Image: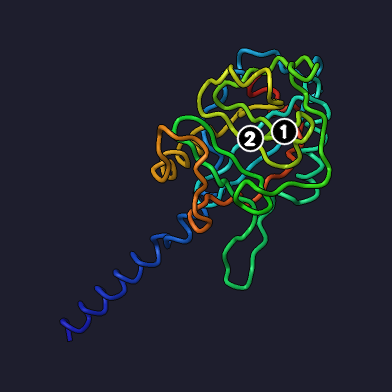
Amino acid sequence: MKRIFAILILICTLGLVACGEPSQYEQDQAKTNTIGTGACVFATERDTKTAKRNVGYVEMCIEGYGRVVFLLDATTAPKTVVNFIGLVKGGYYDAPTTDDGKYHGNTFHIVDKDRLLQGGCPNGDGSGTLENKIFGEFPDNGWANDISHKKGVISMVRENDPNTAACQFFICMKDMPELDPQYAAFGYVIAGMSVLEEVMNDYAKYADAEQAGIILEKEEQPVIKYIKWVPDKDGYWASRHS
C-alpha cells in the first residue's frame, strides 16, 4: 500500500513539474511579445522632443524574436513618414494567420551580415512594389535630410529612379554614411536593437559576408508579425530618449 501511495505521489509530482514548465510554443510567444533592449545612437545624440520635431512611434514585432520600437521623424522626411504610417495603419505590414496556423505575411528577405536587414516586399523576394510611389527625400534629390545611416536607422528602398520608394525598407546594422546622399532615412530604433541583432546573427549565416543582397529562401525568412502605430501616451516614449 505504501509503495502504491509513493508511486502516486511521484506521478503527481512529475505532473506538476510538467504543468509548471511553459511549452516551447509558450516560450516562443513570450519572447515574441517582449520588447528588446538597446537603441540607435540617435536616440541620445539627436534632439527628438516632440515640441521641436514632428515625431511618431511604431512597433515592429518579429515572430519568435521580439518587438522593436522606432521613432519616425516627419520633420526630416514628411512624405516618407506619412506613406509608411499609412501602410502601417492600413495593415500592410501585418501577417495574416492562415488555416495551417503559420504566418505568411511580410518578411525580411535580405539579412546581410553586419550590414542590413531588408523587408516589406509584397513578393518576399525584393521584386515587388506598390503603385503609390513617393518623392525621394534625400540630398541627391534636392532634399535636406540630416538622419545619417547609422546602426539602427530605418530607410527606404528604391529603384534607380529617385522617386520610386513605396513599401520596401531596410534597417542599418552598421554605420553606412555613404548611403546618406541617395536614400531616404526616416527614423531609428529607440528600443529593441537586441532583437534585430539576434535576427541578423541567426539568418546571416545563409549569406556570404562578402556579397550583399542575397535573397533568403522564403521558408527561411524572418517573419514580421506586425508593425503598428504606438501612441505616445503621457510622453512615455519621448521620455525614453530625449
Question: Which residue is depicted at the point 72% across and 33% down?
Answer: 57
The residue identified by callout 2 is: 69
Residue 44, label in figure: none
The three-letter code of the residue at mark 2 reads: Val
CB atoms at circles 2 and 1 under 8 Å apart?
Answer: yes
The residue identified by callout 1 is: 57
Quadrant location, the N terminus: bottom left
Question: Which residue is depicted at the point 78% across and 39% down?
Answer: 85
Q: What is the x, y in percent for residue 40?
A: 57, 23
When asked about the image quadrant of residue 164, the answer is: top right
- Mark 2 lies on a secondary structure that is strand
Q: What is the x, y in percent for residue 8?
A: 26, 79
Q: Is residue 226 left or right of residue 211?
A: right
Sequence-wise, which precedes: disc 2 or disc 1? 1
Quadrant location, the C terminus: top right
Q: Is residue 27 left or right of residue 86?
A: left
Q: Is residue 31 left or right of residue 71?
A: left
Question: Which residue is depicted at the point 65% across and 48% down?
Answer: 127
Q: CA distance from mark 2 to mark 1?
A: 7 Å
Q: What is the x, y in percent for residue 202?
A: 41, 44
- Mark 1 lies on a secondary structure that is strand
Question: Looking at the image, which is closer to me, 168 or 36?
Answer: 168
